Amino acid sequence: MAKDSDKRDKGKAKGAKAAKGKKGKKGTAAGGATLPSVANHPRAGAQVARAKAWGGLVGFLLVGVSSWRAGAPVSDTLLRALAGGVVGYVATWAAAVLVWRHLVVAELRAVRSHRAAEAARRAARRADAS
């Protein structure tokens, strides 16, 4: 029975060490603030998911119809269509993430410039008032 409690104590010690060295979630800074990313954006996640779905469907249908019209057997047609759907899904996902990365950066730049302009207007008002 003493051996069991020793094992538990060692497990607790390992867990405590792991908790100390554990890093935060991906996408968070050291101070706890979230970093800009496609996953953290309020609209980007839904848009990327919708694009992936459409990309998979279009890839499946394009390859399936073209394979069927070429006269391939049904099993080959379905297999090729499935592969086309996967390729369309992945390609569309990559393109959607690429586009949204640029949009997130552009939105951040716009917000930063808007805030700088507001700060300059406030400073000008204070200077006029005094």
Image: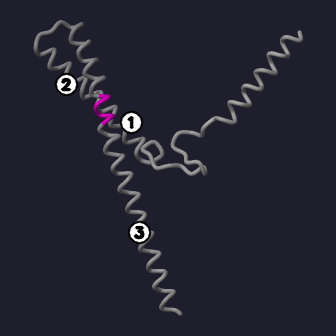
Q: CA distance from mark 2 to mark 1?
A: 20 Å
Could you classify mark 3 by the number of other residues whose Cα lies within 10 Å: few (under 14), some (14-19), or many (20 or more)? few
Q: Residue at x 34, y 31 (%)?
A: 53
**Vertical position of residue 64 compared to residue 108: above or below:** above
Toward which corner of the image does residue 28 lie, by quadrant? Answer: top right
Residue 93 coordinates in the image, percent (x, y): 33, 34
Q: CA distance from mark 3 to mark 1?
A: 30 Å
Pair 3/1: label in front: 3
**Is 81 on the left-hand or right-hand side of 43?**
left
Could you classify mark 1 by the number of other residues whose Cα lies within 10 Å: few (under 14), some (14-19), or many (20 or more)? some
Residue type, label 2: Leu
Q: Dot 1 corresponds to which residue?
A: 49
Magenta span of residues: 89-94
Does label 3 or label 1 sit earlier along the sequence? 1
Toward which corner of the image does residue 79 lie, by quadrant? Answer: top left
Residue 48 coordinates in the image, percent (x, y): 37, 39
